[in-house]
């Protein structure tokens, strides 16, 4: 049996090569990668190439923000958390998979993924790996809020290593009043059409139905 909505996840944006420098997140130092989805999708997981240095405890977060002038702005749009004490120790690296509260990201809009860890210090931190010499991700860049700083700094020739995992977003409309557009009240029927549906083998197959 199958359930509509259980859509196979895919990588939509990513940068996965050239890791040669570690960006420390601790106390009030925050590490960020901006990114621009080329396809509208629902973000569900963020992977980052990461290591820990020293001894760290507590909770670390990947938080998604809107951007203005190329840096994070406003309230947190969505987030996921993990225990940084379980990370591998530098110089070993790992792809940490962080589940994100699902959020629809719109194609062409610049977002920011920020690693925030308020514990630790300059000798004990969670480090996100970056390409500091030959970065080629075209849809965003590395941004950092340095400890003791008062603003974000854009490093436009560098990128952090990441994978943006998500699901396809479907939208279904009906032009109820036949006016040639789909912007009127109740014309977006996506939630009604894509509500979870259970399909069972047997009678559905006999009738020629197929699973979504």
Image (cartoon, helix red, strand yellow):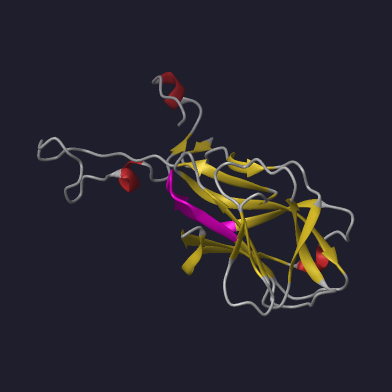
Q: Between 61 and 145, which is closer to the camera in this rendering?
A: 145
Q: Is residue 120 above or below residue 156?
A: below
Q: Where is residue 203, by image quadrant?
A: top left
The reply to whether residue 59 is visible in this rendering is yes
Residue 82 sits inside the magenta stretch = no
The quadrant of the rendering that contains the N terminus is top right
Q: Between 135 and 85, which is closer to the camera in this rendering?
A: 135
Q: Is residue 126 above or below residue 44?
A: below
The reply to whether residue 101 is visible in this rendering is no
Q: Is residue 135 left or right of residue 53?
A: left
Task: Name the magenta segment's main secondary structure.
Answer: strand
Q: Between 197 and 105, which is closer to the camera in this rendering?
A: 105
Q: Between 200 and 114, which is closer to the camera in this rendering?
A: 114
* Residue 74 image position (x, y, % from top left): 45, 69
* Residue 84 image position (x, y, % from top left): 77, 67
Q: Is residue 174 left or right of residue 190?
A: left
Q: Which residue is painted at 48% across and 52% down in the image? A: 110
Q: Is residue 153 left or right of residue 197?
A: right
Total numbered circles: 0
* Residue 21 image position (x, y, % from top left): 80, 54
Q: Is residue 138 left or right of residue 57?
A: left
Q: Which residues are magenta?
A: 100-113
Q: Which residue is painted at 86% across and 59% down in the image? A: 88
The quadrant of the rendering that contains the C terminus is top left
């Amino acid at each position: 049996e199958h359930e509509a909505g259980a859509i196979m996840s895919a990588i939509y944006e990513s940068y996965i090569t050239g890791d040669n420098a570690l960006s420390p997140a601790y106390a009030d130092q925050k590490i960020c990668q901006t990114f621009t989805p080329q396809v509208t999708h629902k973000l569900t997981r963020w992977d980052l190439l990461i290591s820990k240095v020293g001894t760290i405890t507590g909770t670390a977060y990947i938080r998604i923000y809107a951007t203005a002038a190329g840096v994070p702005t406003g309230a947190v749009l969505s987030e996921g958390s993990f225990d940084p004490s379980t990370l591998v120790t530098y110089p070993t690296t790992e792809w940490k998979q962080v589940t994100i509260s699902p959020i629809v990201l719109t194609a062409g809009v610049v977002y920011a993924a920020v690693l925030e860890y308020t514990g630790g210090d300059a000798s004990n931190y969670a480090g996100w790996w970056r390409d500091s010499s030959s970065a080629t991700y075209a849809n965003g860049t590395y941004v950092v809020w340095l400890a003791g700083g008062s603003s974000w700094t854009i490093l436009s020739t560098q990128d952090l290593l990441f994978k943006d995992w998500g699901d396809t977003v479907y939208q279904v409309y009906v032009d109820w009043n036949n006016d040639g557009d789909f912007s009127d009240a109740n014309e977006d029927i996506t939630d009604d059409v894509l509500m979870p549906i259970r399909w069972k083998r047997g009678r559905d197959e006999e009738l020629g139905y197929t699973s979504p």
